[in-house]
Image (cartoon, grey):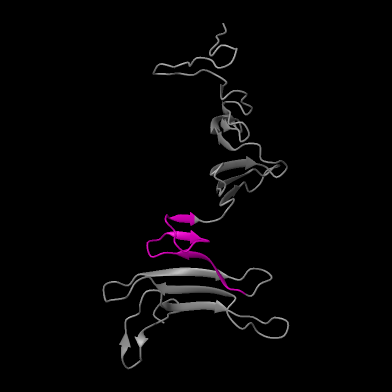
Amino acid sequence: AGGNQGQVMFRKARGTAASPSAVQADDNLGILQTRAYGATGFSSGARAALSFLASENWTDTAQGTYMTFKTTPNLSTTLTEQMRIQQDGNIGIATTTPQSKLNIESNSGQLRLTTASGPTKYFSVIEQNYNSAHPFAINIANNNSVTTERIGVYSPDVGTTNHVVLQPTNGNVGIATTTPVYKLDVVGTARFTQPVVVAEPTASTPAATKNY
């Protein structure tokens, strides 16, 4: 009545109804959960849950909270935390201690960005690998090909031309070319505001050549 919207409200205290006391850090303040019927009976526990918890020992002026989201994987009955929102707004996926506004913990493919339409439906995967030889990568490909670029930076004014490419196999860097054949392969002009130092060649070919 009075224009108020419907609400679900939880109240939590330690102690007793006659003598309540303050909630403590990690106390559950309220839980929304689901149970359902399987082949022979209802599940013995929750299979999905949204929980609200205290993030500190409460006083009248310190009442921090955080939230957890839990699901049950297929072919399992184990309720597992998948995501949480900390008291400072940091969001953790597959981690209970997010260190930034979005912290995703996985051994591969932490973040995938995909186009919604198009003939090839391009996607990129940003990942922090556990392989120390390739600790970070941005892989770019489409649904009909394997990834051929380790890092590609697209220039919006020339369509899909890759302006910077670092090849995963030989470490060649290409600017305005997707197939660099030298450690630094530039198609176009370059400008240097400081001296360019050319080292003594270690092969029979000159360290630097010029064409006119």
Residue that protrudes farthest toward the bottom in the picture: 18
The picture quadrant where one finds residue 26 is bottom left
Q: Could you tell me how many numbered marks the image carries? A: 0
The percent coordinates of residue 41 (x first, y second) are 68, 86
Where is residue 169 drawn, in percent x and y? 63, 34
Task: Please indicate, yes or no, whether residue 106 appears anywhere in the rendered image.
Answer: yes
Instruction: From the viewer's perspective, tell me whether residue 42 is left or right of residue 82.
Output: right
Q: Is residue 167 magenta?
A: no
> Which quarter of the figure has residue 9?
bottom left
Q: Is residue 201 above or below residue 165?
A: above
> Residue at the location (47% across, 64% down)?
96
Which span of residues is magenta-colored?
Answer: 78-103
Taking the view exactly as shown, the residue that stands out farthest to the left is 61
Q: Position of residue 121 (x, y in %)?
A: 67, 44
Residue 91 drawn in magenta: yes
- Determine the image quadrant of residue 46: bottom right
- The answer to whether residue 141 is above or below residue 198 is below
In-front residue for pair 83/154 = 83
